[in-house]
């Protein structure tokens, strides 16, 4: 049985019976002495929940339940049943926290609680909310404690970012004023280090923007979205999304005419709201964020370059490819062109011109980034660089609204390449990411005979599995049979796969997947192979294939 935790509030008790009653109904917690909780849960106590040396930093109590923040984890203590003898201790590791938010209390007695929100990458436990009694918990001290655990060590500010020091807010007309405009990042840095104290000591604000009432900041550690709520504006939510939680991002240029906004979109690894029937449809919630910017006042391509530097990392291999290996051909014509556009079937194109274009005035690619292979269907293009998969989607009749979506290789957790059949027009590539909303799977079609799906698959293998040496060197021999051998046709491998056995010789399969279908990396080896019908399950030293 959990010993009773003594309530030691930081401030005086609630002032009146109405407030006490509302706090009881709303399950509002109050901050208690963390040292007292540690004494009762330490490794030497009758209830040894904490590890030796584990330190309790903050604690909150609501009814019989307790929330404890330690230097190692978040512990939720749930006392159950009439007798209270059944107690659940739920541990959430700090590494599982993908985002967090604090929300200040409103101005009325019916809206008198502040709130702590934690978002995880755990599907069965997507979020945790805790209401906190007004004046009974230090909300920003809680925010600081969570930030210290989730955000990790300080990182240096990026060089070359225009912080707009001394910039005056233009406060545009009401038409389009909801679209964010730039702010002085240095001034926002000063404000959010003091009142309210959201930013950490070594954290720097690098870009800041303001819409009608809301503010978004890009800092050295996270995205901070400040959402002002209600008529009075006293209730404010401060949402933090660490850069490590960003799965993919895109920017979309403004269209022509009355299209006044450009957009930035962020996909995270946080859970979406699954919904519950027709009256409660699924919502992206924190798994997808979008921000509108004034097309006249904000350079959306500067934001894209900033997001690229922040999210792609510094370790990019120098990978080149021989154009002869990519089946580069002239564009389809007539009905072939029409069918390819409708089906989105892409053909390989020469990367030389595209590299120059994307390194040009708008600097869509980073200085040390190069396109390895590219494919085009209609007006849309997919480029595989040495850092990401870049999908360029041209929208509208004028073609001025263009979306550039970036999926870093580091955020791809699985992928598949499917060859075209005898009656198919296209081969397929599927990328699976940690995002659980609409970027969970990215599907790309490639025109049969005009894109080598095997070469694409092997490049992804090298980049996603982290073998940068293979990524840089394997293309020197890709597509060419080993000396003294003749590369068989795909049909011979298909015939071989249809034989009826259960367990296969791993060495024989290893040879097949190098010579007949060059799928394996140079330092990758088959260890176990099993067959089910016509399908194979190949366990290598790097993956399950």
Image (cartoon, rainbow, N blue to C red):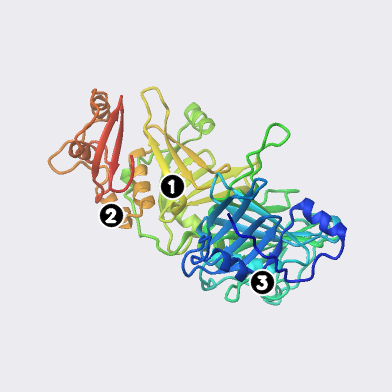
> Is 100 placed left or right of 46 in the picture?
right
Quadrant occupied by the N terminus: bottom right
Residue 413 shows which numbered tag? 1
Residue at (46, 67) in percent of width and height: 52
Nearest the eye: 41 or 226? 41
Decide which of 499, 91 is in the foreground and name it: 91
Q: Which of these two is toward me, 506 or 426?
A: 506
The disc placed on residue 473 is 2
Q: Secondary structure at mark 2?
A: helix
Nearest to the eye among marks 3 and 2: give it: 3
Query: Relative to residue 39, is residue 437 depicted above or below?
Result: above
Disc 2/disc 1 C-alpha distance (Å): 23 Å
Query: Looking at the picture, does residue 232 appear above or below residue 431?
Result: below
Crowdedness near tag 2: few (<14), some (14–19) or many (≥20) residues, C-alpha within 10 Å: some
Q: Can you give x and y, in whole percent of width and height, for residue 224 in the image? A: 65, 62
Pinpoint residue 137: horizontal percent, then vertical percent.
Answer: 72, 66
| Residue 107 found in image quarter | bottom right
**Which part of the image, by quadrant, shows the C terminus?**
top left
Mark toward the start of the polypeptide (2 vs 1)? 1
Q: In the rendered image, which quarter is residue 355 located in? A: bottom left
Describe residue 530's horizontal placement relative to residue 253 as left or right: left
Q: Residue at x 51, y 70 (%)?
A: 153
Q: Is residue 130 left or right of residue 377?
A: right
For the residues marked 3 and 1, what is the alpha-carbon distance in whole angstroms? 35 Å
Circles 3 and 2 in contact, beta carbons < 8 Å: no
* In the image, farthest residue toward the left: 484
């Amino acid at each position: 049985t959990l010993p009773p935790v003594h309530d030691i509030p930081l401030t005086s008790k609630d002032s009146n019976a109405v407030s006490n009653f509302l706090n009881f109904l709303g399950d509002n917690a109050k901050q208690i002495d963390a040292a007292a909780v540690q004494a009762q849960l330490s490794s030497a106590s009758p209830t040894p929940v904490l590890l030796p040396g584990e330190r309790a930093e903050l604690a909150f109590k609501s009814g019989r339940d307790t929330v404890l923040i330690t230097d190692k984890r978040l512990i939720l203590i749930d006392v159950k049943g009439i007798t209270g003898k059944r107690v659940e201790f739920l541990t959430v590791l700090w590494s599982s926290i993908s985002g967090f938010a604090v929300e200040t209390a409103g101005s009325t007695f019916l809206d008198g609680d502040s709130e702590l929100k934690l978002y995880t990458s755990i599907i069965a436990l997507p979020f945790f909310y805790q209401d906190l009694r007004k004046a009974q918990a230090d909300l920003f001290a809680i925010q600081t404690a969570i930030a210290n655990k989730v955000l990790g060590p300080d990182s240096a500010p990026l060089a070359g970012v225009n912080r707009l020091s001394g910039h005056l807010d233009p406060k545009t007309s009401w038409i389009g004023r909801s679209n964010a405009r730039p702010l002085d990042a240095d001034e926002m840095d000063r404000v959010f280090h003091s009142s309210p104290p959201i930013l950490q000591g070594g954290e720097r604000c690098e870009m800041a923007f303001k819409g009608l009432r809301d503010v978004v900041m890009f800092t050295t550690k996270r995205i901070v979205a400040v959402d002002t709520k209600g008529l009075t504006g006293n209730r404010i939510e401060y949402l933090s999304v660490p850069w490590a939680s960003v799965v993919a991002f895109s920017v979309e240029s403004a269209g022509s005419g009355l299209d006044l906004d450009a957009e930035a979109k962020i996909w995270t690894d946080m859970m979406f709201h699954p919904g519950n029937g027709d009256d409660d449809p699924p919502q992206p919630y924190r798994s997808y964020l979008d921000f509108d910017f004034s097309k006249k006042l904000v350079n959306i391509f500067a934001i894209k370059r900033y997001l690229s530097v922040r999210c792609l990392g510094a370790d990019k291999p120098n990978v080149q490819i021989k154009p002869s290996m990519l089946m580069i051909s002239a564009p389809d014509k007539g009905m072939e062109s029409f069918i390819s556009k409708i089906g989105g079937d892409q053909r390989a194109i020469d990367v030389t011109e595209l590299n120059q274009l994307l390194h040009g005035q708008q600097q869509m690619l980073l200085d040390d980034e190069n396109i390895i292979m590219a494919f085009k269907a209609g007006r849309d293009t997919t480029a595989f660089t040495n850092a990401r998969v870049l999908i360029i989607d041209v929208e509208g009749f004028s073609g001025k609204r263009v979306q550039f979506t970036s999926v870093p290789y580091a955020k791809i957790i699985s992928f598949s390449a499917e060859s075209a059949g005898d009656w198919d027009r296209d081969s397929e590539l599927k990328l699976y990411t940690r995002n659980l909303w609409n970027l969970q799977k990215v599907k790309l079609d490639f025109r049969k005979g005009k894109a080598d799906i095997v070469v694409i698959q092997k490049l992804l293998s090298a980049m996603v599995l982290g073998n940068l040496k293979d990524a840089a060197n394997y293309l020197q021999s890709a597509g060419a049979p080993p000396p003294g051998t003749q590369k068989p046709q795909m049909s011979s491998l298909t015939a071989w796969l249809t034989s009826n056995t259960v367990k296969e010789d791993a060495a024989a399969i290893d040879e097949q997947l190098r010579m007949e279908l060059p799928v394996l990396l140079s330092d990758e080896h088959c260890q176990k192979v099993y067959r089910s019908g016509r399908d194979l399950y190949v366990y290598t030293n790097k993956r399950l294939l």
